[in-house]
Amino acid sequence: MKSIWKKLSETGPIFALAPMHDVTDSAFRSIVAICGKPDIFFTEFIAIDGLTNPKGKKKIEKYYLTYSQEEKPIIAQIWGSNLKNIKESAKIIAGLGFDGIDINMGCPDKRVIKSGGGAGLINNPKLMKELVLACKDGSNGLPVSVKTRIGFDEISIEKWLPTLLEAKLDALTIHARTKKELSKVPPHWDIVKKISSLVRKEGTVFIGNGDIKSYDDGLLKIKDNNLDGVMIGRGALGNPWIFNQSINFNDISIEDKINLMIKHAKIFEKSYKDIKKFPHVKKHLHAYIQGFEGAKKLRSQIMSAKDSLEIEKVSLDWLETIKIK
């Protein structure tokens, strides 16, 4: 049976919604699915040490591993450095109906790196490979992929990529910056292009990531850099229509943006009642209200709202005032 990555690469190009901590939860993925689905979704990243802890497992599954059928195909992203725990995590995820497992080897968070995960793994290629193999061992045939960066303190692809590819990944996503650079410099797409032939030669589906602003920009990056696809993260914040080829973001009315924001608040509240506090969704609501007259005032009111009903009242009242004008 073909993996989801193989299927997508044969019909390509592939557009993926990036895994972003405290951002790409089920509520946001549902909104993106409504506006124009990407080819594949990712969860937020999940700590394998927590998922394999009997006390934390139930909470983590509710908090991170819930999804609707509209969000499929979907990949569960995990992080950590314990071989036993990654194998056990893969078994758990395989039992939850996911379409694949992705190992985060690129997160720049200091706490994640200190615990041996995320971008810290770039400095330990042997462990990178072992983690992939252990994950495969527990995945019950689910495809295993990796998301990483072009280096830790410096661009160092040649020091670790060949070892990682020995693990026969199903897919590899490269963010075109080092851990040290974060998002402070332009992405190094020339490096991504340089390694694309090597990665694809191994039969690994190759995805590029870094400051993709639109669907057309994604198509250009795929073509120019010999990629199977691209992954979009921050570009989807405030613009969940980004994967929809038929919609120009500049043509979307203020009213449509605000109505979608209200819908997002309601979906979040319904999905995460007694699981996540309502303020978690406000980063999304804030992102919808940008670039038009009166946005600052409305954002202030939205940030003070305590639930979706209050969001709806404040927003509709504001829309009524601009109609009167």
Image (cartoon, helix red, strand yellow):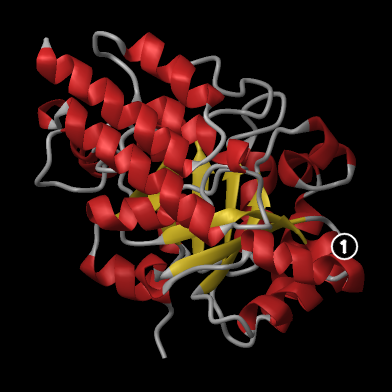
Q: Quick one: quadrant of the N terminus?
A: bottom left
52 left or right, relative to 77: right
Q: Amino acid at mark 1?
A: Asn
Mark 1 secondary-structure assignment: loop
Q: Residue 242: horizontal and vertical position, in percent? A: 26, 41
Q: In this view of the protein, can residue 15 be seen by the observer?
A: no
Residue 180, located in which quarter of the rendered image? top right
Give the residue at x 62% y 82%.
Answer: 94
Residue 293, located in which quarter of the rendered image? top left
Q: Nearer the viewer, residue 62 or 174?
A: 62
Give the residue at x 29% y 25%.
Answer: 317
Name the residue carrying label 1: 82
Rendered view: 281 above or below 294: below
Give the residue at x 33% y 14%.
Answer: 295
Q: Which residue ends up furthest to the bottom in the rendered image?
A: 1
Q: Residue 201: horizontal and vertical position, in percent? A: 42, 61
Question: Within 10 angstroms of label 1, few (less than 14), some, or many (20 or more) residues?
Answer: some
Rendered view: 197 above or below 232: below
Rendered view: 124 above or below 139: above
50 left or right, relative to 36: right
313 left or right, relative to 220: right
Q: Quick one: quadrant of the C terminus?
A: top left
130 left or right, relative to 254: right
Q: Nearer the viewer, residue 149 or 87?
A: 87
Q: In this view of the protein, can residue 314 be seen by the observer?
A: yes
Give the residue at x 40% y 70%.
Answer: 73
Q: How many marks?
A: 1
Q: Residue 8: horizontal and vertical position, in percent? A: 31, 68
Rendered view: 17 above or below 254: below
Q: Nearer the viewer, residue 13 or 303?
A: 303
